[in-house]
Image: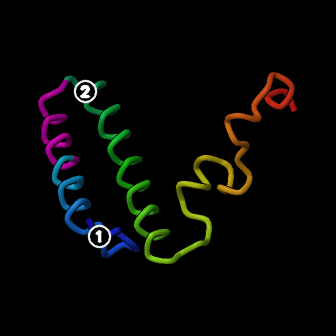
C-alpha cells in the first residue's frame, strides 16, 4: 500500500469524514434544543480541527486556530509520560 503524504493523499478519507459529519449535523436537527446545540458546537469544533489538520498536511507549520483555542502550540505541550502532580501545579 502506498504511503499517504500531504493533504492530497487523504482526499477520499476527508470526503468520507465530511459526509459523516454532515449526517451528524442532520441528525442533530431532530434533537431537543440543548442536545442539538451541544452537538452543533462539538461538530463545529471538529470541523475546525479538520481544517487545521489539512493545513498542516498541506505544509502550513504555523499556529492554527485550534492551537489558539487549546491555549498552546504543539511544541509547548508536555508529553503525557512526563506529567506528574508537580508539573500540573506549575
> Which residue is at a point 41% across and 47% down the rendered structure image?
45
**Residue farthest to the front, as pictured:** 1
Q: Is residue 90 left or right of residue 30?
A: right
Q: Nearer the viewer, residue 49 or 16?
A: 16
Labelled disc at residue 21? none
Q: Taken as a whole, is the magenta stretch helix, strand or loop?
A: helix
Give the mark, 2 or 1, whose residue is nearer the N terminus: 1
- Within 10 Å of disc 2 (Cα), the crowding (few <14, some 14-19, many 20+) is few
The secondary structure type at the circle numbered 2 is helix
Q: Is residue 74 above or below residue 33?
A: below
* Residue named by callout 2: 33
> Which residue is at a point 61% across and 65% down the rendered structure image?
63
Point out the image quarter for the N terminus. Answer: bottom left
Q: Nearer the viewer, residue 23 or 15?
A: 15
**Image quarter of residue 51:** bottom left
* Residue named by callout 1: 2
Please state the horizontal and vertical placement of residue 62, each as a whole percent of the image. 61, 71
Q: Nearer the viewer, residue 6 or 29?
A: 6
> Which residue is at a point 87% across and 33% down the rendered structure image?
90
29 magenta-colored: yes
Q: Which residues are magenta?
A: 21-31
Q: Is residue 41 above or below residue 13?
A: above
The secondary structure type at the circle numbered 1 is loop
Please state the horizontal and vertical placement of residue 39, each as a whole percent of the image. 30, 34
> Which residue is at a point 25% across and 27% down the rendered structure image?
33
Q: Is residue 53 left or right of residue 72?
A: left
Comparing marks 2 and 1, which lies closer to the viewer? 1
Amino acid at each position: 500500500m502506498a504511503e499517504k503524504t500531504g493533504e492530497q493523499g487523504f482526499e477520499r478519507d476527508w470526503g468520507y469524514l465530511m459526509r459523516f459529519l454532515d449526517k451528524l449535523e442532520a441528525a442533530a436537527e431532530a434533537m431537543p434544543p440543548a442536545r442539538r446545540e451541544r452537538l452543533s458546537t462539538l461538530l463545529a469544533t471538529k470541523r475546525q480541527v479538520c481544517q487545521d489538520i489539512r493545513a498542516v498536511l498541506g505544509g502550513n507549520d504555523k499556529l492554527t486556530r485550534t492551537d489558539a483555542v487549546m491555549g498552546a502550540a504543539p511544541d509547548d505541550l508536555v508529553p503525557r509520560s512526563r506529567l506528574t502532580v508537580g508539573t500540573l501545579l506549575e
